[in-house]
Amino acid sequence: MLAEPTASLRSVRDPRVPGPRGEYAPDAGPGRPYWARLLPLLAALACVTRLPSLCRPLWSPDEGYLAVQARMLAHGGTLYDTVVDRKPPLVPWLYEGAFALFGDGSLLPLKVLAVLAQLLTAVLLVSVARRRWGDGAGRTAGVLYLLISIGLNPEDAQAAAFEVFMLPCTAAAMWCADRRRWGAAGTAVACAFLAKQTGGAVLLPVGWLLWKGGAPRRDVLRLAAGLGGPVLAAALLTSPSGFLFWTVTGSGAYASFTGSELHVLGRGLVNSAILAAACAGILPPVVRVLRIARTGAGELWLWLAASVAAVLLGFHFFGHYYLQLMPPLALLGAAALQILPRERTVRAILVSGGACAVFLAWGLLAPRPELAHATRLAETVRAHTGPEDRVLFWGMHPEAYWLADRTPASRFLTAGLLTNYSGGRNGPQVGEKYAVTGAWPVFRRELRAAPPALVIDDSRGKPFAPHRVPALHRILTADYEPVLWVEGAVVWGRVER
């Protein structure tokens, strides 16, 4: 049944002979300015697709969390001790460095770095595709990637957060592995993991390429050294036990599937549908061609499968998790389209461009009510406190600390770390007993040692409301009283005894 379509596909296939791993040599002639022509196009496309990120002071709570962490680190905080999160250290350090160079009043430098990260990812994908299938496939991979790179809810796609800085590391790992540079490949995998844990999934296709090449012992050792060195250094630069706890072992309740199953599955289906719409130009040729024609893309399928597993890990299905799928999808699209007639490539780019325009308009025009709410809370706090006062925002929007320019009263910047509400989980596994292990004794000590001038209850009826968290309710009723109401949030002022 497949003989006829396969023959048809081969008739329009590039006439060059593939190499031993299915790759094609670049078809550029001597002196042809391939990169000189392509790089400005990719740079312009990266800037245009990231325009919405410049229209807001920040896009997501993750950006707010990172900004507050960076300020705390700059003022003597210690990562995985007095500054905590469930993420590895690379992106908090990046924020800290950017703030040290450019000041901490704007995220614009980080937004520019996010543009550069997306451009670098596209360039690496171009290089991988060009090495395998020629110049045209390289251009296709880079352009397709940037067109689909914003194909999610703008809050997920436009934020200068963990996944965006993880992506060039994953692409670099595949680029290095494709060239048998195993030490560099291991380092790139380590950097991907240190940006976000799920970035380590790229180790699977990298390991596959190593195994296909015979896996000489020296190459295995180079890969292991490249991988282990940066991770060990990060652990030693922070705290080995704290690093292990906060990045690996301390998230059991967060990663549990129990609680809010329908809510979480619904989110996963919606985000999958949004990504499918963004990739409408890529998926048809991939499905049609790669299942019936050999293109030397086995490791790319493995990369995609590992990335899908990374999205599933933790059972939260946030939209920004899906960014990890985009680089392998772009390469698979280029692999499929280089087999098909040229008009199919034009059609795929036009469809992807149309979808990109829709997502671009969404990012530019969509209102951001939660950001507006956090901004109003921050303005209220700034008006009723002094620069040296500490405050506590009891909610899921740590960006309020950064917007208010006030010091957090606790290292726990969201109610999620103290109740397991993180990620919109609203089922039975929300409460004090589901908090990060050991968090509540530390939290109580912090509030006793330096009581916040204001506590802003921004729960607005959610399961982590103070009346459902007895320890916090006792603190509020004993030492504070409601003084203001702002759009459903309650501002508690300290009562002098």
Image (cartoon, helix red, strand yellow):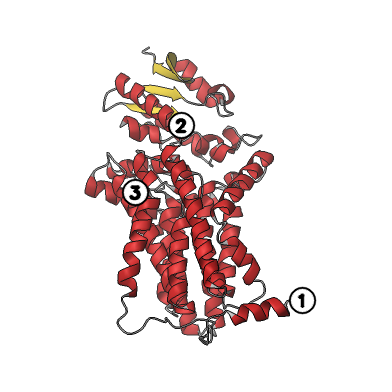
Foreground: 387 or 403? 403
Foreground: 374 or 15? 15
> Mark 3: which secondary structure?
helix
| Residue 124 on image: x %, y % | 41, 68
Q: In the rendered image, which quarter contains the C terminus? A: top left
Q: Amino acid at mark 3?
A: Lys
Q: Amino acid at mark 2?
A: Glu
- CA–CA distance in space, label 2 to label 3: 20 Å
- CA–CA distance in space, label 1 to label 3: 51 Å
Q: In the rendered image, which quarter contains the N terminus? A: bottom right
Which is more N-terminal, label 3 or label 2?
3
- CA–CA distance in space, label 2 to label 1: 54 Å
Badge 3 is on which residue? Answer: 111
Judged left or right of residue 234, residue 98 is: left
Badge 2 is on which residue? Answer: 370
Which residue is drawn at the image coordinates 65% and 68% (left, top)?
288
Which residue is drawn at the image coordinates 39% and 58% (left, top)?
118
Q: Amino acid at mark 1?
A: Met
| Residue 324 on image: x %, y % | 51, 57
Judged left or right of residue 121, residue 293 is: right
Residues under numbered marks 2 and 3 in contact, where contact means CB atoms less than 8 Å apart: no
Residue 283 visible from this viewpoint: yes
| Residue 285 on image: x %, y % | 60, 66
Which is more N-terminal, label 3 or label 1?
1
Residue 61 lies in what quarter of the image? top left
Badge 1 is on which residue? Answer: 1
